[in-house]
Image: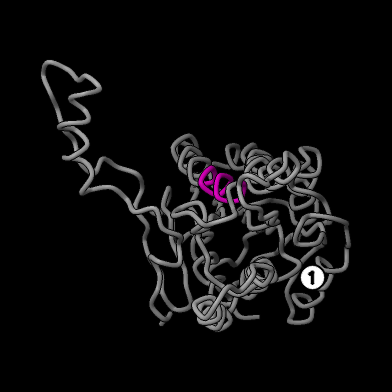
Amino acid sequence: MSEGLLEGKVVLVNGAGRGIGQQIAITCAEEGAKVVVNDLGATVEGQGRDTGPAQETVDKITAMGGEAVANGGSIADWDDAQAMVKQAVDSFGQIDGVVNVAGILRDRIFHKMTEDDWDSVIGVHLTGYFYVARAAADYFRKQESGAMVHFTSNSGLVGNVGQVNYGAAKMGVVGLSRSIALDMSRFGVRSNIISPSAFTRMIETIPIKGPEGEVRRKRQEAMTPAKIAAPVAYLLSDAAKGVSGQIFYVRSNEIMLMSHHRPVRIIHRGEGWTPQLIHEHAMPALKPHFTPSAPAGSYFNWDPV
């Protein structure tokens, strides 16, 4: 394999048995990294275990001349997260990058969502991402280098119907990554976010509703997971040393830099506010700047380039 941006690096990619995670693991290997391929092998709803998907990705990497090992642990388990990071060090002598991409779905309209629906999704997408990042942080701090890439979603950044648990977790990932970037910058550690748009088995589970849904599905099917992998590999590389604390939305050949929450409009009254004055003056001044309550599809409604 030819030398790439990740030559000499060791990268852990969770959720790498299928879809986007698998493509990321393969691209990292193509760029010269040694890869720990983690995948629980569960269903989309997080049920069951199967070592096959992780090993399949390892086989693909080794067949093209790369180096990889499989890991079947759960990122939602503290000890498993510690073990997968340790496996990278035991197998390859170091760890340089972590990609948190594993995920499950338990979509329900809000008033029908159960405690288990909530806990399961938060446990993987937010708690699990924290566990893996925290396990890697000890090594990164000691070596004074390291890169993390965490996956969010438009369900968190914008919002989607039937995904309160998923949206809350994915918005939580934004806060997680931003805080890691601030806390760990003194040790030369970077943390960034990718919000992907690609057709995967998770997307395939979302019901198609009406002609608009069919159009959206055709648009999604044209966006392959392979398109997401190159930006991730770049963010893990030394070439991205000046990039941290950012959110990138990747859709086909488009890379969008997303904004962070900042004040949009400020009003002030020296004497303070009463509820009536807020009604009469504050809200009329603020309402023209409100963010519309609309699902993510309404914001990204053009065909991907």
Q: Is residue 186 left or right of residue 8?
A: left
Q: Quadrant of the N terminus?
A: bottom right
Instruction: From the viewer's side, name the closer residue of 283 and 5.
Output: 283
Seen at 59% across and 53% down, the residue is 163
Q: Is residue 120 left or right of residue 172?
A: right
Establish if 164 lies above or below 299: above
Instruction: From the viewer's side, name the closer residue of 97 and 4.
Output: 97
Q: Is residue 34 left or right of residue 178?
A: right
How far from the left and from the top, in percent, is residue 212? 49, 77
Q: Quadrant of the C terminus?
A: bottom left
Q: Which residues are magenta?
A: 165-173
Dividing the picture into quarters, in which one does residue 44 lie? bottom right
How far from the left and from the top, in percent, is residue 62? 78, 76
Seen at 54% across and 56% down, the residue is 161
Establish if 283 lies above or below 124: above
Question: For the residue marked with disc 1, what is the amino acid?
Answer: Val
How far from the left and from the top, in percent, is residue 257? 36, 61
Q: Main secondary structure of the magenta part?
A: helix
Q: Residues within 10 Å of mark 1 (few under 14, many from 20)?
A: many
Give the residue at mark 1: 58
**Could you tell me which secondary element the residue under label 1 belongs to?**
helix
Instruction: From the viewer's side, name the closer residue of 134 and 77.
Output: 77
Dividing the picture into quarters, in which one does residue 294 lie? bottom left
Any magenta on residue 168? yes
Extreme top residue here?
A: 271
How far from the left and from the top, in percent, is residue 109? 62, 52
Instruction: From the viewer's side, name the closer residue of 143 and 257.
Output: 257
Any magenta on residue 260? no
